[in-house]
Image (spheres, rainbow, N blue to C red):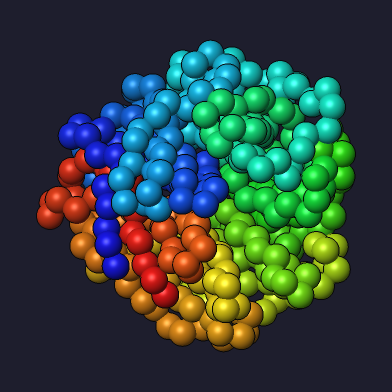
Amino acid sequence: MRHITVFREPGRFAGWPANYGMWHWGDEIVVGFTVGAHRTVGRGHAIDKRQSVVNMQARSLDRGLTWRVEAFNGDRPGERGLSADEHMNPGLRLAEVMSAETAAIPSQPLNFQHRDFALMLARTGLARGVFSFFYLSYDRCRTWAGPYRLPQFGSTGIAARTDTIILGAHSALFFLTANKADGEEGRVICVRSDDGGQSFRLLSEVGGEPQGPGDFAIMPAGLQLPSGRILCARRCRRGGSGLSWIDLYASDDQGHSWQFMNRPVTFQRARHSGNPPCLKQLSDGRLLLIYGNRDGPYRIAAQISEDEGRSWSGEIVLRAGGANGDIGYPRAVVLDDDSAVAAYYINERPDGDGERFIEATIWQP
């Protein structure tokens, strides 16, 4: 394994690739993330909520060996940070300058199969009233069109991160986090567009709505197998005990219904809320499940399935040495030689008070 620094600056907090996305075209890779100011905290994310954040991306032209950092070249209403309101004080939040109706509806169907295509989902915050939207690029993330509107689907809020399955030029599944009936995050829904993002319809809930106070199922990771079966992993938490895990579901009818498969990951320490999954497939059919492990010792980890998710290998450590649980949120791509490039955020100063930075691990499973 090789660990490559993507973005690192003293005094800065760089984080959450899973909120934005990672894409590749041959040897070229782009990963999105956000950058704010570091602030010492006793627990949680070491980001200064009194200062604004900016959306960034990094590009590699050599399969993840070197990276060039770029600004996100798309419309950010009010120049506010995307998908970061819960980490900002009032006066800096995106929802203060944008409404659910602000985002446009595409004037013509978008081409989800364009050769240089990328799609990024974004949101305001997490609580009741949160809304989401998406951006599209036809030039490998050099410029972004949007924001384009996502409906609320009858929910008290939609808190989207980037997770889609492209089915055709104008057809795609979007896996979204919807708020529960009590207005809190979360339950996972699967929605579909067949007109290039001009309209959407709700297909299903993936695994149902968690019922207890503080319970959630959020941040899905979808994957379509060659057989047509669709898998979806969910980040889950039980509010009462504070325990977290990752569940896996399967659909054999294009996302209309789901069956529970298993629980590949059960975290042992309470009250760290777990970490989102990233699900990928190699050319030989093996599946990769990548996640941050906040149990301690803090690490970026993976598991492998050789039977399409029915059983899992047990944990493989991709990157050890995290100083505390403020790590993870991975996204990954699989290249033509079956090497996996996983990007995540991490910190490693022994006291846990150092800058948070973006790193990539290149791994040959």
Q: Is residue 252 left or right of residue 53?
A: right
| Callout count | 0
Residue extending farthest left = 350
- Which of the 4 image quarters holds residue 16? top left
Query: Image height check: is 168 above or below 134?
Result: below
Q: Is residue 166 left or right of residue 51?
A: right
Residue 30 seen in the current view: yes
Q: Looking at the image, which residue is at 45% across and 19% down?
A: 92
In the rendered image, residue 40, in percent from the top left (x then y), is placed at 21, 38
Seen from the viewer's position, the closer of residues 277 and 58 is: 58
- Which of the 4 image quarters holds residue 103? top right
In the rendered image, residue 349, in percent from the top left (x then y), is placed at 14, 50
Query: Image height check: is 224 above or below 162?
Result: below
In the rendered image, residue 85, in percent from the top left (x then y), is placed at 50, 30
Residue 245 seen in the current view: no
Query: Image height check: is 351 above or below 212?
Result: above
Which quadrant: the C terminus? bottom left
Q: Is residue 269 left or right of residue 324?
A: right
Q: Looking at the image, which residue is at 73% across and 62% down?
A: 206
Q: Looking at the image, which residue is at 51% across and 63% down?
A: 336
Q: Is residue 129 left or right of residue 71?
A: right
Q: Looking at the image, which residue is at 49% across and 78% down?
A: 304
